[in-house]
Image (tube, grey):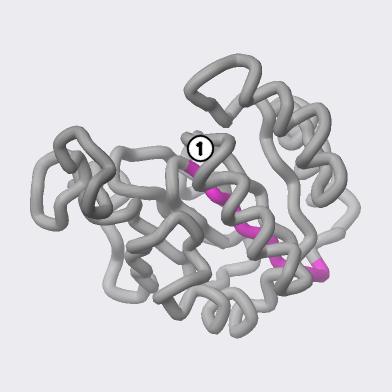
Amino acid sequence: IERAGGLVGKHPGGLLQKHPCNRQPLLLTARQGLPPGAGGAPSLIEGSEGAAIVAELAPRPEDVVVTKHTTSPFHTTDLGVYLRRFGVSTLLLTGYSTTGVVEGTLRDARDQDYDCVVVRDCCAAATVQEHDTCMDIVFPRMAWVASVDEVINALYLASNQSAYSTGSALMLDGGLCT
């Protein structure tokens, strides 16, 4: 998916997208390291190769960069301020872990009155059962759960009907963009 086309590109440290309405793009990088007692080696340490943004999606001077440090990108960041400033009302969520970061972001986004779409085949969990439980039972209470093809088709139809009267954003691998 191309950056210039108004859709998102994925990279290890987060994501970046230029909004089709020429709004400022947001880059949200994944949580830095692991919390105490989480086990395993930290994989997204600021300044490390694992947290680097691929060159093709490097932030431009006019891009806003938000780094998340907790499960939800709404805590300890100014993300909500930027989303409201850019008129974003709908979030598309994807990433790992379905039962952690995606669910935490979805719950916080709904608490702040965002409409949400969870892209089912762009999320993953530790087990199929955990993933399916969220997608089939939990998330439909709070969001539209759809395949990537359904989302692309809906965005295509909306763009052809000039339906971008409100902004949208995408959560991908711990990243959110508008």
Q: Position of residue 116 (x, y in %)?
A: 75, 53
Q: Main secondary structure of the magenta part?
A: strand
Q: Residue at x 54, y 83 (%)?
A: 81
Q: Where is residue 96 in the image (x, y as percent from the top left)?
A: 47, 35
Q: What residue type is labelled 1?
A: Gly
Residue 126 versus residue 108 in the image, above or below: above
Q: Which residue is drawn at 71% across and 33% down?
A: 134
What residue span does the magenta drawing correspond to? 165-172
Residue nearest the viewer, comparing 76 with 8: 76
Q: Residue at x 29, y 47 (%)?
A: 13
Q: Position of residue 154 (x, y in %)?
A: 82, 40
| The residue positioned farthest toward the front in the image shown | 37
Using a 10 Å C-alpha cutoff, classify the residue at mark 1 as few (fewer than 14 neighbours), some (14 to 19) or many (20 or more). Answer: many
Q: Per the image, is 132 magenta?
A: no
Q: Which quarter of the picture shows residue 144?
A: top right
In screen coordinates, is 1 left or right of 133?
A: left
In screen coordinates, is 46 left or right of 148?
A: left
Q: Can residue 168 be seen in this view?
A: yes
* Number of marks in the rendered image: 1
Q: Where is residue 128 in the image (x, y as percent from the top left)?
A: 60, 15
Residue nearest the viewer, comparing 124 with 90: 124
Q: What element carries label 1?
A: strand
| The residue positioned farthest toward the right in the image shown | 161
Q: Per the image, is 171 magenta?
A: yes
- The residue to which callout 1 is attached is 95
Quarter of the image with the C terminus is bottom right
Q: Which residue is drawn at 60% across and 84% down?
A: 85
